[in-house]
Image: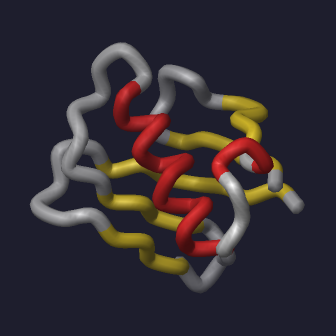
Amino acid sequence: MRINVRVIPRAKLNKIEVQPDGTLRVHTTTAPTDGKATADVIKMLAEHYNVPKTSIKLIRGETSRDKVFEI
């Protein structure tokens, strides 16, 4: 399953919002340096979908706010 994600770094709190078009907006308090925000997003997606972190793979958007993950 592929998931389109819009990452909002340096947010006030961590949360996941589902948009009407199916895109997820993931708010993370982590700064986007050295891939830390992406790692935090993977952790949040794993909790949201109740799967291990190792089963979530970044397909596209390593340095972008718009990312595509595969579970």
Give the image quarter of residue 45.
bottom right
Q: Is residue 30 left or right of residue 71?
A: left
Residue 17, how many percent across, how many down?
A: 44, 77
Q: Residue furthest left?
A: 12
For the N terminus, which image quadrant?
Answer: bottom right
Residue located 22% across and 32% down the image? 31
Image color mode: secondary structure
The residue under the point 20% across, 50% down is: 29
Which residue, as the protein is rendered here, is positioned at the far bottom? 20
Counting from the top left corner in percent of width and height, residue 56 is at 73, 47
Q: Is residue 69 toward the left or the right of residue 46 in the image?
A: right
Name the image quarter holding residue 47: bottom right
Q: Residue at x 56, y 73 (%)?
A: 48
Residue 35 at x, y percent in the picture: 43, 23
* Count of marks, rendered view: 0
Of 12 and 39, the residue lying toward us: 39
Check the picture and name the quadrant holding the C terminus. bottom right
Locate residue 6, reporting x and y percent: 49, 52
Front residue of 24 and 42? 42
Q: Toward the viewer: 61 or 38?
A: 38
The residue lying furthest to the top in this view is 34
Residue at the image position 47 percent from the left and 36 percent from the top: 38
Q: Is residue 5 left or right of residue 7?
A: right
Q: 33 or 24, which is in the foreground?
A: 33
For residue 53, above or below residue 50? above
Q: Specify the quadrant of the image occupied by residue 54.
A: top right
